Image (tube, helix red, strand yellow):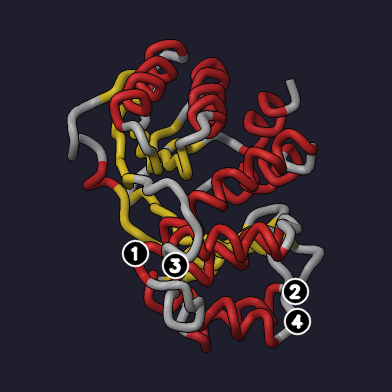
Amino acid sequence: MSGHSKWATIKHKKARTDAARGKAFSKLIREITTAARTGGGDPDSNPRLRTAIDSAKGINMPADNIDRAVKKGTGELPGVSYEEVTYEGYGAGGIAVLVKALTDNKNRSTAEVRHVFDKYGGSMGAAGCVAWQFKPRGLIVIPKDKSDEDTVLTVALEAGADDVQTDDTAFSVVTSPGSFEAVKQQLKDAGVGWLSAELTQIASNTVPVDEKDARRVLKLIEMLEELDEVQQVFANFDIPDEVLEKVSSE
């Protein structure tokens, strides 16, 4: 996971702009609506919905927006029904890329995702070509100025986390999907604040990426994430921190 928590920090800083926050609102509204449609409108009994609502509150989405999104999912208000689609492919340097989307027009979404892959040095692959390299995990990224290592290790591992990794800027708490909510709650109860907390996909192996390919890799991921219907993008790149910092600031 080298570089991934630092990349999460960089993305979080970029997301502070009004335009980026508006796009994040749109993506989370889709996720809240879909979560409510598939698992019901009660976040206490629907972990996916609870996670989406927590993420929405984390970027200061108004409560009315959240409530309307839930009601659209449960059918109390009219709304669009989204289909969950997964795309797979490769980026520069042979990295594996997994893309999760929510769309009301699969043909349009597929064409847009393929265009981005082609434009930024990647290629779309057949279903199953890279998904086997990723495993569903919970990931909580905690900046080092939010807590100390002993507290994070003790609370997270006692709550059922699988691993706690550290780099220069953050702790990365890795959990199984089933223990994600319990670990998050225990950290919250202990007063530990986090940068991001999400159900994600973590690669079982990583591919080293040099500076030349790093630019194309990060541009590919950034432009995929810019697509309205793309919810999450996962990749198995391993970019050295100093390269990541340099390329991201250009």
Q: Are marks 4 and 3 in contact (CB under 8 Å)?
A: no
Q: Position of residue 171 (x, y in %)?
A: 63, 63
Q: Are marks 1 and 3 in contact (CB under 8 Å)?
A: yes
Badge 2 element? loop
**First along the sequence among labels 1 and 3:** 1
Badge 4 element? loop
Spatial CA distance of label 4 from label 1 is 32 Å
Spatial CA distance of label 1 from label 2 is 38 Å
Apparent side of residue 52 relative to residue 47 in the rendered image (left or right): right
Residue bearing the label numbered 2: 148
**First along the sequence among labels 4 and 1:** 1
Amino acid beneath label 2: Asp
Q: Position of residue 44 (x, y in %)?
A: 50, 83
**First along the sequence among labels 3 and 2:** 3
The quadrant in which the C terminus is found is top right
Residue bearing the label numbered 1: 38
Q: Splitting the image into 4 quarters, where does residue 38 fall?
A: bottom left
* Label placed on residue 48: 3
Amino acid beneath label 4: Gly
**First along the sequence among labels 4 and 2:** 2
| Residue depicted at x 69% and y 40% | 22
Question: In the picture shown, does residue 6 fall above or below 178?
Answer: above
Neighbour class for label 4 at 10 Å: few (<14), some, many (≥20)? Answer: few
| Residue 111 in view | yes
Q: Position of residue 240 (x, y in %)?
A: 58, 36
Q: Splitting the image into 4 quarters, where does residue 222 fall?
A: top right
